[in-house]
Structure formats: structure tokens, C-alpha cells
């Protein structure tokens, strides 16, 4: 089964910090290190390469601001898969679930759905449970990616025995990421710029969870997961047959 299919089942119930993790088939590397510096309109697009799979693309952007909060949008596409868009209102780094204030997802032509924010924080580790992150400054290096050649700061991060080489340049997208590399996944900058606009322009439907957060289950089609709007087919379960 194509591992990218996992996103379609997972993205509706995962926070921004792990949506790309699911998209990459459970690999640990599609993670952003460094400072989150949101500027409205800034965007960066990356090629994600995993072992034994065709490349995928990921685009991250800051598409709006509400007071002190920013709308962070991530778009993920892969061969023969529907485009998946997550749009999150954040008070800080979107990889930390405590910073998520609103969470909207749209997969393919399905209606945009706003999830109860509690869903994105279920099972999130507290500070005491977070693995320790260490970093080593490897100096400034010339690095070539599809977007061009850059003089980038090279950092080596270690998280729970997983190492990531990361090259960053100030002012490129929200994180400055140019390239990252782990044992499983390479991430390389394809393009970047400003003027980003949201790809979710419709009013999202509210997802409810029966018995949780005060939700109800009226109006669902037979066999649909709780909270899914009428007429929306359920996603394939993780690890299910994709028909290939």
C-alpha cells in the first residue's frame, strides 16, 4: 500500500506537529527545528523524499493574522493522492499542540472541517514527557537545493536518539528551512516567496464528537465516523487496502 494514504485517515485528528509525520508513513523527519518567525504572506515549498516512495511536496505559509494569533497553513500533495490542506490558528510554534487555537482541514474536494481543538491535543505529551533536544552548530555551509544555492547555517539536532541535519537561512518561510536530512527522509526547498493566500476559502463545517466535548451525532450517513457531515465518505483505515 502506498504509505502516503495514511494522511487521509490521520490528518483529521492530528495536530500540525504530526500531520506531516503521518503523511510520510510514520517517519520522524518531517519536523521543523529552529525559531518560528511568522510573517503574513510568507511561504516556502519543499520536496519530501522517503525511501521506496515517489516524492511528495509540502507547502507551508502564513496566510493571515487575528490579533496576536497567526493562520499557519500546510498543503501536502503526493502522486495519486488528494491534496490535503490544514489551516491552523496559532499563538506560537504550530508544532507544539498547546499553541493551536483553531484547526481546519480540507482533503481533496471534501468540505472543509473545523475540528474541536481538544482532538488535536489528545495524547499530547506534557513538558515532563517531551524528549530532550540537543543541538550542535556545524557552521555556515554552501548548500544546493531545487530553489538554488544558499549560504546556510548547518545544525545537527538530536531528539530521542534520532539525528537531523538542518540547514537554515533567515527569512525563508516561517522557519528559515532550506534543507533537512535524517536516516529516513530528505526535505529540500523547492521555492519560496511572499503574497501567500489561503486555499480554504469556504466556511468550514463544525465536526462534533458524540459523548465528547458536548457533540452530537445527528445527520450522519450510516457507517460514517462520529462527527462526519452527511454525505461525506469515511476515510480508509490506516494500513487498509488502497486497491492497488
Image (tube, rainbow, N blue to C red):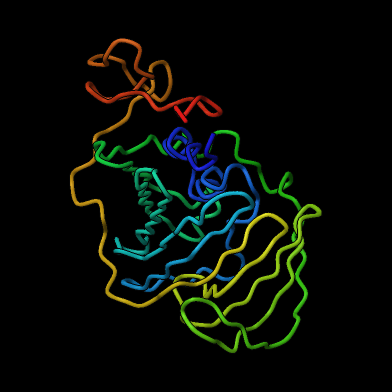
Query: In front here: 99 or 47?
Result: 47
- With respect to residue 59, does 209 lie above or below? above
- With respect to residue 15, does 180 lie above or below? below
> Residue 21 placed where, x, y %?
57, 47
Point out the image quarter for the N terminus.
top right
- Residue in the picture at 45% in, 72% down: 190
Q: Is residue 119 left or right of residue 183?
A: left
Query: In front here: 11 or 49?
Result: 49
Q: Quadrant of residue 129?
A: top right
> Residue 140 placed where, x, y %?
68, 88
Q: Is residue 199 left or right of residue 78?
A: left
Q: Quadrant of residue 210?
A: top left
Q: Which residue is at the far top? A: 222
- Residue in the picture at 49% in, 64% down: 47
- Residue in the picture at 35% in, 12% down: 223
Q: Which residue is at the far left? A: 202
Total marks in image:
0
- With respect to residue 6, does 101 lie above or below? below
> Residue 85 placed where, x, y %?
35, 49
Q: Which residue is at the far right? A: 161
Q: Is residue 29 left or right of residue 131?
A: left
Q: Is residue 87 left or right of residue 174?
A: left
Amino acid at each position: 500500500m502506498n504509505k502516503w494514504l495514511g494522511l487521509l485517515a490521520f490528518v483529521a485528528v492530528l495536530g500540525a506537529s504530526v500531520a506531516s509525520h503521518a503523511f510520510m508513513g510514520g517517519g520522524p523527519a518531517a519536523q521543523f527545528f529552529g525559531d518560528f518567525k511568522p510573517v503574513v504572506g510568507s511561504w516556502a515549498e519543499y520536496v519530501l523524499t522517503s525511501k521506496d516512495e515517489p516524492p511528495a511536496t509540502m507547502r507551508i505559509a502564513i496566510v493571515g493574522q487575528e490579533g496576536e494569533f497567526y493562520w499557519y497553513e500546510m498543503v501536502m500533495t503526493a502522486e495519486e493522492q488528494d491534496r490535503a490542506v490544514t489551516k491552523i490558528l496559532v499563538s506560537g510554534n504550530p508544532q507544539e499542540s498547546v499553541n493551536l487555537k483553531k484547526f481546519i482541514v480540507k482533503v481533496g474536494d471534501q468540505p472543509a472541517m473545523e475540528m474541536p481543538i481538544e482532538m488535536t491535543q489528545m495524547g499530547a505529551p506534557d513538558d515532563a514527557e517531551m524528549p530532550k533536544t540537543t543541538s550542535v552548530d556545524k557552521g555556515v555551509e554552501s548548500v544546493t537545493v531545487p530553489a538554488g544555492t544558499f549560504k546556510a547555517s548547518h545544525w545537527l539536532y538530536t531528539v530521542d536518539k534520532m539525528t537531523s541535519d538542518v540547514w537554515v537561512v533567515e527569512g525563508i518561510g516561517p522557519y528559515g528551512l532550506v534543507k533537512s536530512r535524517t536516516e529516513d527522509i530528505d526535505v529540500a526547498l523547492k521555492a519560496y516567496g511572499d503574497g501567500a493566500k489561503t486555499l480554504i476559502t469556504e466556511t468550514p463545517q463544525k465536526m462534533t464528537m458524540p459523548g465528547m466535548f458536548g457533540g452530537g451525532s445527528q445527520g450522519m450517513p450510516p457507517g460514517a465516523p462520529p462527527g462526519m457531515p452527511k454525505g461525506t465518505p469515511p476515510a480508509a483505515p490506516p494500513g487498509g487496502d488502497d486497491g492497488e
